[in-house]
Structure formats: structure tokens, C-alpha cells
Amino acid sequence: MRDSEIRRDFLREISDEKLTKYFEIARKAFEDIKINPPKGSHMEKVANDYLDMAKRYYEDAKYFKEKGDYVTAFASLNYLHGYLDAGARLGVFKVSTTEYFAFEEETR
């Protein structure tokens, strides 16, 4: 097998280290977010729904990792982060850093 084939095969796998890294990023992101809209508002409901969905995907990711299905666990982590990123961009989550979220400083 050539080096390029080995590298390509490596890129097709989700390692334990990579999965652990993304679980840690998700954990830190969850710790950083705060519900931003006023209590009782429609947007507070949106924020709570986004957070609920993200937490459900986190639990799914843990379940699939435990079963050894790293691909589905990684997909679940990406879905959860989609909810967190969307909430941060929409402004329903207040965040203190862009380190765990996909947007620039001026959009917070």
C-alpha cells in the first residue's frame, strides 16, 4: 500500500482521539451557552428547543460511541453542534467565546 492510500484510509476513519476531542468541544460549548431571550418570550422557547435537541444528540452520540459506532456518534456530535451554532448565530444563546462556535466575533 502506498503512503497516499494509507493516508486516505486514515482520513476515512474516526479515531477514538478525534471522537474524544469532539465530545470535549461539545461539553465546553454546553458550559458556555446561556439562554439569551427574555423569559416567557417565543424566542426563549426557541432557545430551549435548540438546547433540548442538542442535548438529545449528545446522548445519542454517547450511546453510539458505547456501541462502537463511531461514525454515527460523530454525526450526532455534528448535528448537536449545528443546533448550538444556529442558536448562537440567531442570538438565542449568549456565548462568551467564538472558540466553540462557527461565527465571527461581531455576530455575537
Image (cartoon, rainbow, N blue to C red):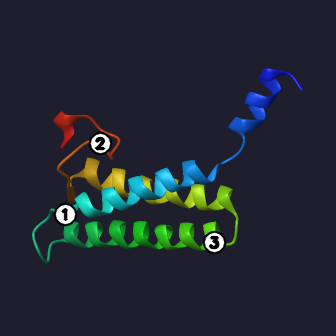
Cα distance between the residues tagged 3 and 1: 29 Å
Name the residue at 27% across, 66% down.
Answer: 47
Assess whether mark 3 and mark 2 are in contact (beta carbons under 8 angstroms): no
Cα distance between the residues tagged 2 and 3: 27 Å
Q: Label 3: which residue?
A: 66
Residue 105 at x, y = what percent?
19, 36
Closer to the camera, 9 or 85? Answer: 9
- Amino acid carrying label 2: it is Glu
Residue 87 at x, y = what percent?
30, 56
Q: Quadrant of the N terminus?
A: top right
Name which quarter of the figure residue 37 lies in.
bottom left
- Callout 1 secondary element: strand
Question: Local crowd at mark 1 within 10 Å, few (<14), some, or many (≥20)?
Answer: some
- Amino acid carrying label 1: it is Lys
- Amino acid carrying label 3: it is Glu
Q: Label 1: which residue?
A: 34
Sequence order check, earlier mark of 3 and 1: 1
Q: Label 2: which residue?
A: 99
